[in-house]
Image (cartoon, rainbow, N blue to C red):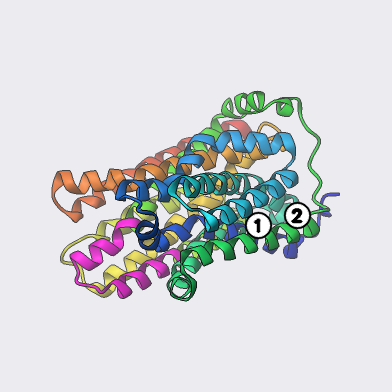
């Protein structure tokens, strides 16, 4: 049965967010452990880069297909299978004797991660009362900043205590616990009747991509993720090399910035709960990112002001993700194709994650200074604003 129209199962929603946090930890655990992994398994720098980007590559290539498969199999069964893949991948990684086994484990974890982030939003909405649907999606999207910031803080003492294999083994146990909890807590979240379009993943993808609203919702999401991941990836380097910050200071600043992203996620859910349309929330988010990014890399800016802008940048970015996911789901051809629609958004943001850091690096290298990074982020913000305003025109025609 679905949740009653006037009741939101907040306990179930928070559990689903916790499952997302477990998935995000798997995404972020590699960065801190790379030095140890490289030393033990003789992994080169290029190989380390690929190991770190496996999740983004899988999302960028299989996001839509993962959403369609979740619609086909059912969102709850997809979640259960994804958690099993996540735990199995971590267990294989903990025992890996060479880089081939470690890469295989990361691919399995990546498949589980993408399946989770395409299936869980539909379950969250199903656990919510109609009035809380968009608020719930805002709450759901905090899984990523919480998971990434959490592993950034926890990884150094864990590495010192047991090494990278202990982190992988602990995460296998964490995924197993999440699997048991999901089996118990999601039993009441029945899947909607399957539509004709969901009879095959290909038909689901065709029907979803034929909806311009779904595709346009993905553009601001992609622009945000490309800008955000690029700035967050290089902000420590900029602070250490150009501003003279210590590695510890730079790490704390980045962790705080990631948490501000989560606050933006919650703010977006609240704004949509107060009847602000998703396109408007995306417009505010993309415009805000573009404006505040102008000062982050400005050479002569005061340190305190730069830190404030570095906090504001991910906050504004955090407004975009819940709005993009909510709008993608809103434009799904049928309730049974919500996973496919969200898969389109996930594929778009994964493309942004994959391309953002290298493109920013090329811009800075080609034009000879970090201050040129503002051109990159500004253009991305402008592109997101334009897409959101075009989406507004389409939606007005739909309701006319």
Looking at the rendering, the stretch of residues picked out in magenta corresponds to 233-258
In the rendered image, residue 325, in percent from the top left (x then y), is placed at: 57, 46
Give residue 29's position: percent from left, percent from top.
Answer: 47, 60
Residue 117's place in the image compared with 147, above or below, is above
Q: Pinpoint residue 232: horizontal percent, then vertical percent.
A: 35, 58
Residue farthest along the left direction in this orientation: 368
User: Dot 2 corresponds to which residue?
Assistant: 127
Q: Say whether residue 272 is left or right of residue 352.
A: right
Instruction: Give the vertical position of 144 relative to 114 (above or below).
Output: below
For the point 63% across and 24% down, the residue is 202
Are dots 2 and 1 in contact, CB under 8 Å? yes
Say which residue appears at 43% left-offset and 48% top-offset: 99
The disc at residue 4 is none
Look at mark 1 in the image and give the residue it sits on: 136
Residue 253 covered by magenta stretch: yes
Name the residue furthest front: 97
């Amino acid at each position: 049965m679905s949740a009653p129209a006037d009741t939101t199962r907040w306990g179930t929603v928070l559990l689903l967010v916790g499952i997302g946090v477990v998935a995000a930890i798997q995404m972020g655990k590699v960065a801190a452990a790379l030095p140890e992994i490289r030393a033990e398994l003789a992994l080169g720098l290029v190989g380390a880069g690929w190991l770190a980007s496996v999740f983004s590559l899988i999302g960028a290539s299989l996001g839509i297909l993962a959403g369609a498969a979740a619609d086909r199999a059912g969102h709850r069964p997809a979640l259960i299978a994804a958690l099993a893949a996540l735990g199995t991948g971590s267990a294989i990684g903990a025992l890996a004797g060479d880089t081939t086994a470690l890469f295989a484990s990361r691919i399995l974890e990546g498949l589980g991660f993408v399946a989770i982030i395409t299936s869980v939003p539909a379950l969250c909405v199903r656990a919510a009362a109609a009035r809380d649907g968009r608020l719930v999606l805002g709450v759901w999207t905090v899984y990523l900043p919480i998971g990434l910031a959490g592993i950034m803080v926890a990884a150094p003492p864990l590495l010192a205590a047991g090494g990278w294999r202990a982190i992988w083994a602990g995460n296998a146990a964490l995924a197993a616990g999440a699997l048991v909890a999901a089996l118990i807590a999601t039993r009441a979240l029945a899947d909607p009747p399957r539509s004709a379009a969901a009879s095959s993943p290909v038909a689901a993808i065709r029907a979803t991509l034929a909806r311009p609203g779904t595709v346009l919702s993905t553009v601001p999401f992609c622009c945000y993720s490309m800008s955000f991941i690029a700035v967050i990836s290089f902000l420590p380097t900029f602070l250490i090399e150009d501003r003279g910050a210590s590695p510890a200071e730079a790490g704390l600043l980045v962790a705080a910035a990631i948490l501000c992203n989560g606050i933006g996620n919650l703010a977006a859910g609240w704004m949509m709960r107060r009847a602000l349309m998703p396109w408007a929330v995306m417009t505010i988010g993309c415009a805000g990112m573009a404006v505040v990014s102008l000062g982050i890399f400005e050479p002569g800016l005061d340190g305190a002001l730069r830190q404030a802008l570095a906090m504001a940048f991910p906050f504004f970015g955090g407004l975009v993700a819940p709005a993009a996911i909510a709008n993608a789901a809103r434009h799904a051809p049928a309730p049974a194709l919500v996973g496919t629609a969200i898969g389109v958004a996930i594929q778009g943001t994964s493309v942004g994650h994959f391309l953002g850091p290298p493109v920013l690096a090329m811009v800075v290298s080609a034009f000879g200074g970090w201050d040129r990074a503002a051109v990159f982020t500004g253009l991305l913000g402008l592109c997101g604003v334009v897409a959101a305003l075009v989406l507004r025109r389409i939606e007005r025609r739909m309701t006319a």
